Image: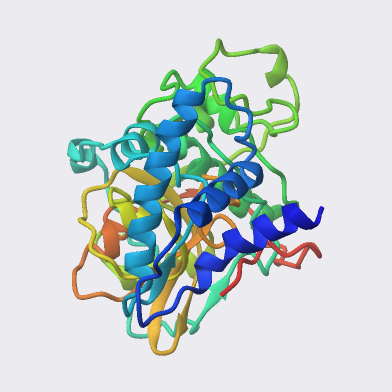
Amino acid sequence: MAYTLFIILSLLSILFCSISSIPTRLESEIKLLYEGWLVVHHKNNYYDLREKEKRYEIFKDNLRYIDEHNAGNHSFQLGLNVFADLTLDEYRNLYLSPQSETWNKTLKVSNRYKVTKKDKLPDSIDWRDKGAVTSVKHQGGCNSCWAFAVAATIEGINQIVTGDLVSLSPQELVDCFNMGCSAGYRHLAYEFIVKNGGIHTEQDYPYTGINTTCDDEQRKGKAVTIDGYKIVPVRDEKALQKAVVNQPVSAGVDGYSQAFQLYQSGIFKDFCTTFLNHAITIVGYDSENGVDYWIVKNSWGNQWGEAGYIRIMRNVNTPEGKCGIANWPLYPTKKGKPLGVKSKGTSNRSPS
């Protein structure tokens, strides 16, 4: 027990690296960190020792990159998260889906959340505190981030309108929307849900992380419905802010960098393009030490980032927003008078 605790404490020590110098690590220390990381992430069952050694070398390279970054003066820290044994190419191939934006040209943008001079937007909002956000989920090896983002926004608007927070099924979208574990378009997923009379609960249609045949038996339960979806005025962070004041919003970002892969905490301000390759859910916004940021729920489990969340810099000098977050935000619509957003008692907040 004490040895296990020591391993975990050694692992966590990377989060507190000196900002003045790059740590010099002995091979024995790195091996200890690796063995501790394997335990924490339930990967200590390698049958192929050559594969374990290969992963160790990748782990060492990532640790070196993490130490170099954390020794600098940055607004965010990197750490040995769930992706610490993946090369950058492996991470990109497994978890990102570069998408063409040609389909966007045919879709009509809604002015519902266009900001006017009369609007006075609050300084911050966090839908986790208002009981409209379920726990962080993990898409696993299935490239289904789009399904998680769509489900999360419907969970949010359904709770706002009905008062009930219900965890919904990304797996139903993977199986029945015919996109499978590949790049999926959020607007088509919303349309599919409308045409099919709703999306079912995660309890009725649990997540498996693989693309299988649509199971009609699992779809006989009560579904959560929406009326449609709309597009926030694009390349307009103020409009996106107004939208997020009213409900959680799905968006795309560029997560192509090694810094994004190994993100641990803080406000992400690193270089990124505006080319969208990953779908996320914006559940709020705030500011820290004069820096504005979006509160972003991811679908890579709670051992990535701030318990599954990332804070991305807000109000930047490019209309697309940091990492393209304001490029094509979408949200579902559901008729009904909001019943309020009372806290459900269990907070889904991450450290901030």
Q: Which residue is at 52% across, 20% downward?
A: 48
| Residue 201 shown left or right of residue 85 in the figure | right
**In this rendering, does residue 337 appear at all?**
no
**Residue 121, image x and y in percent?**
45, 81
Query: Residue reaching furthest top?
Result: 213
**In this rendering, does residue 162 appear at all?**
yes
| Front-lying residue, 178 or 339 | 178
Q: Which residue is at 51% across, 74% downward?
A: 16
| Residue 109 shown left or right of residue 282 in the figure | left
| Residue 230 shown left or right of residue 225 in the figure | left
| Front-lying residue, 249 or 20 | 20
**Residue 44, image x and y in percent?**
62, 34
Q: Which residue is at 68% across, 54% downward?
A: 159
| Front-lying residue, 174 or 84 | 84
**Residue 225, image x and y in percent?**
62, 38
**Residue 251, image x and y in percent?**
38, 52
